Structure formats: structure tokens, C-alpha cells
Amino acid sequence: MESKFKLCAECMSPMTQGFVIDIASKSAYQLMWHEGITDDVDKQGFVKKFENLDRSKIAFVKTYKCSKCGLLKSYAHFEGHEK
Ligand SMILES: [Zn+2]
């Protein structure tokens, strides 16, 4: 269960909510997570057929950063269908 305020597991300082971005072609994307594995990956590590992925298994990655030591901790956030 997520709570609104989080403390760092390393130093117990307050953590700030944010998200990890991925840059491609001068655009910034919020990082996502997909349940399971895929073999449909090209030599550069890109998933070839994004449109074929099961959208119900895709979550946005919500990341918190410790205000003191910089530790990052991430959670999968399923919009509209919490798991
Ligand atoms: Zn910390």
C-alpha cells in the first residue's frame, strides 16, 4: 500500500515524488513498466511492436528521490486499474 509521504530506507530522510524520463528524438517520455517478458526485441534493445503490447499490463513508473542521500525508489502506477 502506498502512502503519500515516504521516508528513505537508507537514511530515513523525506523523499520527493517525481518520474524518470527517457529522451528520444528531442522528446521526453515518462518511463513505463510492462509485466512479464518479451522476446520481440531488436539488436538495440527496442521492443519492436509496441502496439502489440497488452495495455492492461503497462504502468507508469512513479519515482521518489531522497532529499538527503539521493536514493531513488520506484513504484508501478496503473492508472484507473490499481494492481
Ligand atoms: Zn536517503
Image: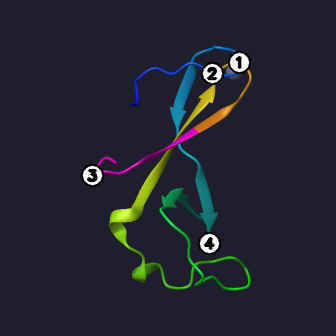
- The residue tagged 3 is 81
Find out whether the residues at labels 4 and 1 contact each other: C-beta distance under 8 Å: no
Residue at disc 2, CB closer than 8 Å to ligand 1: yes
Q: What is the distance, in whole Å, between disc 2 and disc 4 at their CAs?
A: 34 Å
Residue type at mark 2: give it: Cys
Q: Nearer the viewer, mark 4 or mark 1?
A: 1
For the record, the magenta segment spans 74-83
The quarter of the image holding the N terminus is top left
- The residue tagged 1 is 68
Q: Residue extending furthest top?
A: 12
Residue at disc 4, CB closer than 8 Å to ligand 1: no
Q: Dot 3 lies on which element?
A: loop
Q: What is the distance, in whole Å, between disc 2 and disc 1 at their CAs?
A: 9 Å
Q: Position of residue 7 (x, y in %)?
A: 57, 18
Q: What is the distance, in whole Å, between disc 4 and disc 1 at their CAs?
A: 33 Å
Q: What is the distance, in whole Å, between disc 3 and disc 2 at their CAs?
A: 27 Å
Residue type at mark 1: give it: Lys
Dot 1: few (<14), some (14–19), or many (≥20) neighbours within 10 Å? Answer: few
Mark closer to the chain start, 1 or 3? 1
Q: Is residue 6 above or below residue 28?
A: above
Residue at disc 1, CB closer than 8 Å to ligand 1: yes
Q: Residue extending furthest left?
A: 80
Residue at image coords 49%, 85%: 49
Looking at the rendering, the quadrant in which ligand 1 lies is top right
Q: Dot 2 lies on which element?
A: loop
Residue type at mark 4: give it: Ser
Find out whether the residues at labels 2 and 4 contact each other: C-beta distance under 8 Å: no
Q: Which mark is residue 8?
A: 2
Find out whether the residues at labels 3 and 4 contact each other: C-beta distance under 8 Å: no
Find out whether the residues at labels 2 and 1 contact each other: C-beta distance under 8 Å: yes
Q: Which mark is residue 25?
A: 4
Residue at image coords 73%, 85%: 43
